[in-house]
């Protein structure tokens, strides 16, 4: 089976990339492939990069409130492209109520607070497995 492949980045003016870099390292240590696009991305650029790289899951690091507007825009850009790859978000600013809103809009998983490495890895592997099974 091909290794899982993830895109990780931040949207808008969010400059806090320490969490994204830590998750990138964690996933690479778990033998997963990661395309890291860094800071200052737009929903369009994330959707385009995800399609070009052929990633399984898009991960958005959220440490500013911009995600409340930009993640729904990303989901819309993906939908316009006919791209149904899972989107996950994570970050310390995500409240429980905002997490529920994001899930209702179509975000596949939300990591707020301090999830364990195993929680993140297991959730992401489950998303990839489900996606690949649906395509088979």
Image: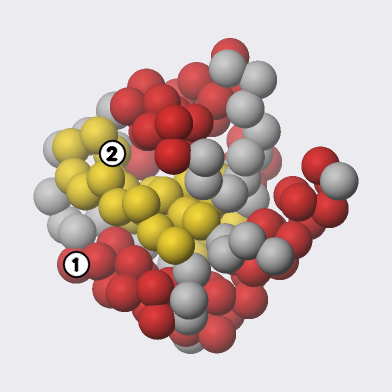
Crowding at dot 2, Cα within 10 Å, few <14 / some 14-19 / many 20+, comes out as: many
Q: Is residue 116 visible?
A: yes
Could you give the CA–CA distance between mark 1 and mark 2, rounded to whole angstroms? Answer: 14 Å
Secondary structure of residue under mark 1: helix
Per the image, the residue denoted by label 1 is: 18
Residue located at (62% from left, 40% from top): 85
User: Left or right: 46 with respect to 57?
Assistant: left
Crowding at dot 1, Cα within 10 Å, few <14 / some 14-19 / many 20+, comes out as: few
Within the image, what quadrant is residue 34 found in? bottom left
Circle on res. 81: none
User: Left or right: 109 with respect to 9?
Assistant: right
Q: Quadrant of the N terminus?
A: bottom right
Residue located at (51% from left, 56% from top): 5
User: Left or right: 36 with respect to 89?
Assistant: left
Per the image, the residue denoted by label 2 is: 11
Q: Horizontal and vertical percent for residue 47? A: 44, 29
From the viewer's perspective, is residue 82 above or below residue 126?
above
Secondary structure of residue under mark 2: strand
Residue located at (76% from left, 51% from top): 132
User: Left or right: 133 with respect to 108?
Assistant: right
Residue located at (51% from left, 46% from top): 55
Q: Horizontal and vertical percent for residue 96? A: 52, 61
Q: Earlier in the sequence, mark 1 or mark 2?
A: 2
């Amino acid at each position: 089976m091909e290794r899982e492949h993830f895109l990780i980045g931040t949207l808008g003016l969010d400059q806090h990339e320490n969490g994204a870099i830590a998750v990138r390292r964690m996933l690479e240590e778990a033998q997963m492939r990661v395309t890291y696009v860094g800071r200052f991305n737009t929903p369009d650029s994330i959707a385009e990069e995800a399609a070009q790289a052929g990633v399984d899951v898009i991960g958005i690091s959220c440490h500013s409130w911009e995600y409340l507007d930009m993640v729904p825009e990303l989901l819309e850009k993906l939908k316009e492209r006919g791209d149904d790859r899972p989107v996950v978000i994570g970050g310390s600013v995500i409240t429980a109520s905002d997490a529920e809103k994001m899930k209702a809009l179509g975000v596949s998983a939300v990591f707020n607070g301090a999830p364990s490495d195993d929680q993140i890895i297991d959730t992401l592997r489950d998303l990839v497995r489900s996606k690949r099974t649906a395509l088979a």
